[in-house]
Image: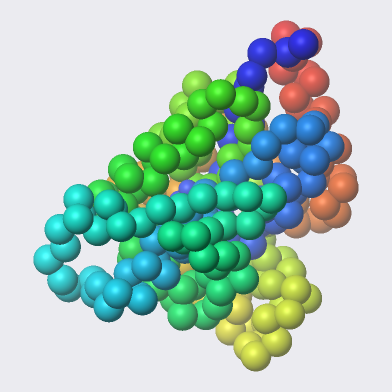
Amino acid sequence: MKDNYIIAIDGPSGSGKSTISKKLAEKLNIEYLNTGSMYRAVTKYFLDNDIKKTDHIDFSKVFCKIKIKFDNNRIYLNDKDITDEIRNDMITKNVSWVSSIREVREFLVDSQRQIAKDSSFILDGRDIATVVFPDARYKFYLTASPRVRAQRRFDQGELDKSIDEIEKDIIKRDEYDSTRAYSPLKKAKDAIEIDSSKLTIDQTIALIIKKMEEKDAL
Ligand code: DC
């Protein structure tokens, strides 16, 4: 049996990371952690407790009160299932500033390392290969053009906005995520970049598995 291993999948929002990671984890029969959902959970806690960007925050006190758990691909914040709620527009609008706070990142990176320390895992996010698991066995950077990503979001049901508006939001969030001071979104030097603009989900998964096999053969 193969030793435990980590697959790191980073990339901008809407690049298909979570759909692909989830399916790939099922195929390989390993665990999956969607780290974006953890930043969304902390954002929900901040909004619920009226913690604002401009507040002076006592992080050690705040983090003591935040318990994030996963069960069956559902995420729980202090024992409440928040899986669906964290996808709403309010959380999506606020998650960028919350995830740019150094203390929030340190808190969550630490939890992510703890969660994935004893078994094989796929983690998807923005800083998995650069910060969380720089020694991950397999590293991928998934991209797609902003237009294609906007079209996917639209097809998934984000119907209250036009494709142009979704595309504008995506470009704005990319800019914010890749220029923030702490762990900005960027491709790790040794990550394999995959542009999924012209690929289906299954084609992308097949390509990732091929690249993993090529690496194993080295
Ligand atoms: O993948 P997502 O769209 O659900 O992520 C939500 C936000 O969380 C995104 O704006 C960037 C941030 N994020 C991050 O900074 N680092 C990660 N590892 C994962 C997500």
Please state the horizontal and vertical placement of residue 144, each as a whole percent of the image. 68, 56
Question: Which residue is found at the position 28% from the left and 53% from the top?
Answer: 63
Residue 129 screen position, x and y as percent: 51, 34
Image point 46% across, 39% down: which residue?
Answer: 112
- Say left or right for 101 vs 170: left
- 28 shown above or below 53: above
Q: Position of residue 163 (x, y in %)?
A: 67, 82
Query: Going by the image, does 139 lie left or right of 19?
Result: left
For this orientation, the residue located farthest to the front is 79
Q: Would residue 16 be found to the left or right of residue 179 on screen?
A: right
**Residue in front for this viewpoint, 86 or 18:** 86
The colour scheme is: rainbow
> How many marks do you count on the picture?
0
Q: Which image quadrant for residue 124?
A: top right
Q: Looking at the figure, which quarter contains the C terminus?
A: top right
Residue 130 visible (yes or no): no
Q: Nearer the viewer, residue 112 or 145?
A: 112
Q: Residue furthest bottom?
A: 160
Can residue 89 be seen from the camera position used here? yes
In percent of width and height, residue 64 lies at 27, 52
191 left or right, relative to 72: left
Image quarter (top left, top right, bottom left or bottom right) of the N terminus = top right
Vertically, is 83 above or below 144?
below
Instruction: Look at 58% across and 84% down and name the residue there.
Output: 165
User: Which residue: 80% across, 20% down?
Assistant: 213
Front residue of 123/82: it is: 82
